[in-house]
Image (tube, rainbow, N blue to C red):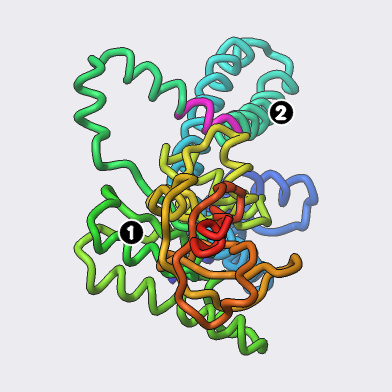
Amino acid sequence: MLRWIVTLFFIFLGGTLGYLFVPDLIKILNFGLPNWATNSYVGAGIGAIILYLISFWVADYIVGLIRLVEEKLVKAPATDVLFGTMGIIFGLIVAFLIVLPLNTINLPVFSTVLPIFLTLLLGYLGFQVGFKKRDELINLFSRKSDKKKDIEEVVKERHGVELKILDTSVIIDGRIADICQTGFLEGTLVIPQFVLEELQHIADSSDVLKRNRGRRGLDILNKIQKELSINVEIYEGDFEDIQEVDSKLVKLAKIVSGLVVTNDFNLNKVCDLQGVPVLNINDLANAVKPIVLPGEELHVQVIKDGKEHNQGIAYLDDGTMIVVEGGRDHIGKHIDVIVTSVLQTSAGRMIFAKPKLLEKAL
């Protein structure tokens, strides 16, 4: 269908050019043809036939170019297309206003060539400005809109509807499904298409560990989408000018004013630096761990020996590690210990303790 449209365009263009120029060309070349050959309608037919024959060689290339542009536009985010189109329209309006006084000048260059050049140039510049300044324009419009609303109205509108954008690591981790099931996470979960592609790539890896992690991530997504009541949306857009998935997540969060959900320490820092709200699952896990104070008693099982001399290692039910001084002699036993200090690190909370029996002996 598209090829037929291109062919019809060539026939129409050839007919128009033939109607305007072929009769004069025949007269100039003086082929000795009869008078009917210089008729404008005959010229239109000749031009249409010539351009129709040419279309057999160039139509396929033009159709391929149109298909390529169509594919790029379909994959581009709606905001990019919208602001790029608005930029083109604004550039063409400015070009039209500039060309109007140029048409009054009798010089052929000013009345024919220059208007075409200005139209193409300003249309291109308008598209580039609209496309590259889209984020600033979105923020400008949103700020103007927010100023017109009361604080209470803004709170009501945004309460519980923020978009939570999941990254690959938090999907593979799996705890996000349990958090959603408890009802502590509100709003809409957004899963970008480029995150799904990365997850699919991991699931197809030749490395067994990576493949299992990728498949577990896909199972978690399936569970969230089918078994839980939380709303899940797939973002189809992509940012082809950005290579890193983490950078794409930050860009998307800025555009939709959403929050990034992750357990990646580096992505957490990048979001903080760029002013993007972030929910870190590890921070949540550390926050809900029970608070243990020095002097409290705990009943634990010493699992193994520690790094330092005569140390033993035990764990709480939530996975918090307990370093037991003098606990090496109690490996495999359940003993009562007294907390001496608590250390909070980026990896989690670490508790230092000593056996209660040792405390009594002292």
For residue 211, side relative to residue 183 (left or right): right
- In the image, residue 103 above or below residue 50: above
Residue, x 61% and y 49% (percent of image)?
346
**Mark 1 → mark 2, Cα distance in angstroms:** 50 Å
**Whole-percent x and y of residue 248?**
58, 51
The residue tagged with tag 2: helix, strand or loop?
A: helix
Q: Position of residue 123 (x, y in %)?
A: 59, 32
Residue 281 covered by magenta stretch: no
Residue 131 appears in the rendering: yes
Q: Which residue is mark 1?
A: 233
Label drawn at residue 5? none
Q: Give the vertical position of 130 relative to 194 (above or below).
A: above
Residue at 59 percent across and 70 percent down: it is 313
Tell me which segment is drawn in magenta.
132-138
The residue shown at (43%, 77%) is 218
Q: Is residue 137 magenta?
A: yes
Where residue 299 sits, quadrant-wise, is bottom left
Q: Earlier in the sequence, mark 1 or mark 2?
A: 2
Q: Nearer the viewer, residue 10 or 147?
A: 147
Give 343 or 205, whichever is nearer the viewer. Answer: 343
For residue 113, the mark is 2
> Which amino acid type is marked by label 1?
Glu
Nearer the observer: mark 1 or 2; the answer is 1
- Sort mark 1 into few (<14), some (14-19) or many (20+) by Cα contacts within 10 Å: few
> Which residue is more in the foreground, 88 or 299?
299
Percent of width and height locating residue 118: 66, 25
